[in-house]
Amino acid sequence: MAANPSENNLNVTDGLAASGPGSSPQFSPLYQQIKGLIMQGLEQGEWKPGEMIPSETDLATRFKVSQGTVRKAIDELSSENLLVRRQGKGTFVATHDEARVQFRFLRLMPNEGAQTAPESKIVECNRMRAPSDIARLLEAKPGDTLVLIRRVLSFAGKPTILEEIWLPGTLFKGLTTERLNEYKGPMYGLFEMEFGTKMIRADEMIRAVSAGDEAAQYLAVNSNEPVLLIERVSFTYGERPVEVRRGRYLTRDFYYSNQLS
């Protein structure tokens, strides 16, 4: 049975959180502490993707705080796409199969028309030893077994993205080309529902490069065609890196969109 988030060592009434060994305690707003407790429940699997969490009233009783404090914590988790409010129904754990979050990590927008889901063609899915640079990003040991996926994403039949995806082998046992081809939803939905790994945030680096010979072959362009090289490290709960993704994006008919706040 999953641990009850209210039974951990954090005292939600004192407003203090230690910042590290030998350091002075730092003030933590009460709603942030409640947010942390709800996050622990999500991480421990108390509420699964797509399931409804307890009401604000029930959570307020459970954590012995006001309903307004709980609401503020849930508002922040909703803004981070970890929870989804549904009018008249309640608050649910977000899933990557939800239409509103399907494109959260795909920021490529068409120059004209609405954003649509791409078609995915798996080029390979193999288990291999971790290269040192990938191992470092995944906090793994060089030589640990990783899963490498390579695929092409197409929009309206036009190859647009060539991706290389690295995943920890211990978390993704049984992931095969056949399973990837069978699953018709977003890849992150498969990771979350079948392998218990939810991507909650990512760091990206973007630079302009030439397509190169391999990408040119898959994207049907010249090797000197300008593309965006997007390198992403995705994290699950607890700031644990669980994916390295490198993609070459053809931007003849698209642009990369991001909202800054």
Image (tube, grey):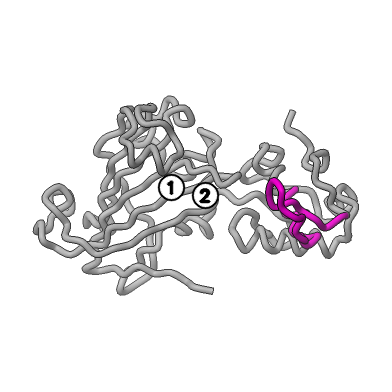
- Determine the residue positioned at 31% across, 35% down: 131
- Depth check: give the residue in front, 135 or 111: 135
Residue 156, relative to residue 190: is it above or below? below
Residue 210: x %, y % from top left: 16, 60
Mark 1: which amino acid? Pro
Q: Residues within 10 Å of mark 1 (few under 14, many from 20)?
A: some
Determine which residue is flagged by label 2.
Answer: 96
Determine which residue is flagged by label 1.
Answer: 186
Secondary element type, mark 2: loop
Magenta residue span: 14-37
Cα separation, mark 1 vs mark 2, equals: 7 Å
Left or right relative to 235: residue 29: right
- Among the two numbered marks 1 and 2 on one chain, the one whose residue lies closer to the N terminus: 2
Query: Is there a contact, CB below 8 Å, between mark 1 and mark 2?
Result: yes
Residue 61, relative to residue 28: is it above or below? above
Residue 218: x %, y % from top left: 17, 49
Residue 209: x %, y % from top left: 20, 61
Q: Residues within 10 Å of mark 2 (few under 14, many from 20)?
A: many
